[in-house]
Image: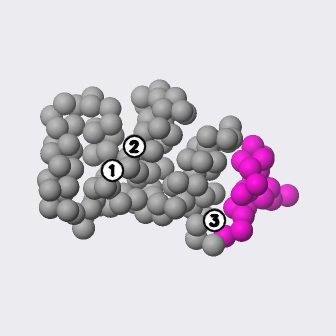
C-alpha cells in the first residue's frame, strides 16, 4: 500500500492544477482497478482541513461534505477512520474549531479520556480539559 500526501488530495479536490488533478484521478482509478487502497495518514487529514479553509476559503459545511465524500471512496483508507467519522458527526453539531475536534476525536480513538489544553475555546468541547 502507498500513502498520499496532502497535495495529491488537494489537487484532486480543488483542480487548481489541471494536470496534477488528472494525475491524481488516474492514480485513484488505477488503484481501484487493481483493488488496492491508498492510505491517508491523520496529519494529511488535518492539513486538508487547514488548506481548504485557509488557502481556498472553503466553508465548514463544505469541508465536512468533502470528507464524507472521501470516506465513501473505496480506494482511500484513512488512518483512524472511526475517529474521522466521529469528527464529522461532532462537527455537524458543534461550532468548535475543526482542527481541535479532529485532534480530540483522534485522541479519543486512541483511548484517551480528554485532551489537556490551555485553549479556553477548545475546552468548551467535552473532549477537552482546560489546564489551570
Q: In which image quadrant can residue 3 be found?
A: bottom left
Residue 50 in view, yes or no: no
Which portion, as a residue range, is magenta? 112-132
Q: Are the two marked residues, 2 and 1, in contact with CB atoms closer than 8 angstroms?
A: yes
Give the mark toward the camera: 1 or 3: 1
In the image, 33: left or right of 16? left
Give the residue displayed 42% in from the left and 28% down from the top.
56
- The verdict on residue 11 being magenta is no
- Whole-angstrom CA distance, mark 2 to mark 1, is 7 Å
Q: Which residue is mark 2?
A: 69
In the rendered image of this protein, does residue 23 appear above or below residue 106?
Answer: above
Label 2 to label 3: alpha-carbon separation: 23 Å
> Where does label 1 land, which residue?
73
Real-space CA distance between mark 1 and mark 3, rounded to the nearest whole angstrom: 24 Å
The residue shown at (48%, 50%) is: 46
Q: Position of residue 119 (x, y in %)?
A: 73, 48
Q: Is residue 127 magenta?
A: yes
Vertical relation: 13 (above or below) 34: above
Q: Position of residue 4 (x, y in %)?
A: 29, 55
Q: How many numbered marks have been drawn onto this rendered protein structure?
A: 3
Q: Mark 2 or mark 3, which is nearer to you?
A: 2
Identify the residue under disc 3: 108
Judge left or right: residue 125 versus residue 15. right
Q: Earlier in the sequence, mark 2 or mark 3?
A: 2
Query: Quick one: label 2, few (<14), some, or many (20+) residues within 10 Å?
Result: few
At horizontal 54% and vertical 33% (from top left) the residue drawn is 61
Q: Are marks 2 and 3 in contact (CB under 8 Å)?
A: no
Q: How would you rate the neighbour count of disc 1 (Cα within 10 Å): few for under 14, some for 14-19, many for 20 or more?
A: few
Amino acid at each position: 500500500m502507498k500513502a498520499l500526501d496532502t497535495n495529491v488530495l488537494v489537487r484532486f479536490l480543488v483542480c487548481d492544477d489541471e494536470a496534477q488533478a488528472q494525475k491524481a484521478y488516474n492514480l485513484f482509478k488505477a488503484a481501484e482497478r487493481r483493488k488496492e487502497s491508498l492510505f491517508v495518514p491523520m496529519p494529511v487529514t488535518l492539513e486538508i482541513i487547514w488548506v481548504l479553509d485557509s488557502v481556498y476559503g472553503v466553508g465548514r459545511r463544505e469541508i465536512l461534505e468533502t470528507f464524507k465524500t472521501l470516506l465513501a471512496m473505496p480506494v482511500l483508507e484513512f488512518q483512524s477512520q472511526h475517529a474521522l467519522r466521529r469528527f464529522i458527526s461532532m462537527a455537524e453539531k458543534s461550532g468548535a474549531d475543526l482542527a481541535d475536534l479532529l485532534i480530540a476525536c483522534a485522541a479519543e480513538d486512541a483511548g484517551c479520556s480528554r485532551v489537556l489544553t490551555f485553549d479556553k475555546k477548545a475546552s468548551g468541547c467535552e473532549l477537552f480539559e482546560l489546564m489551570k
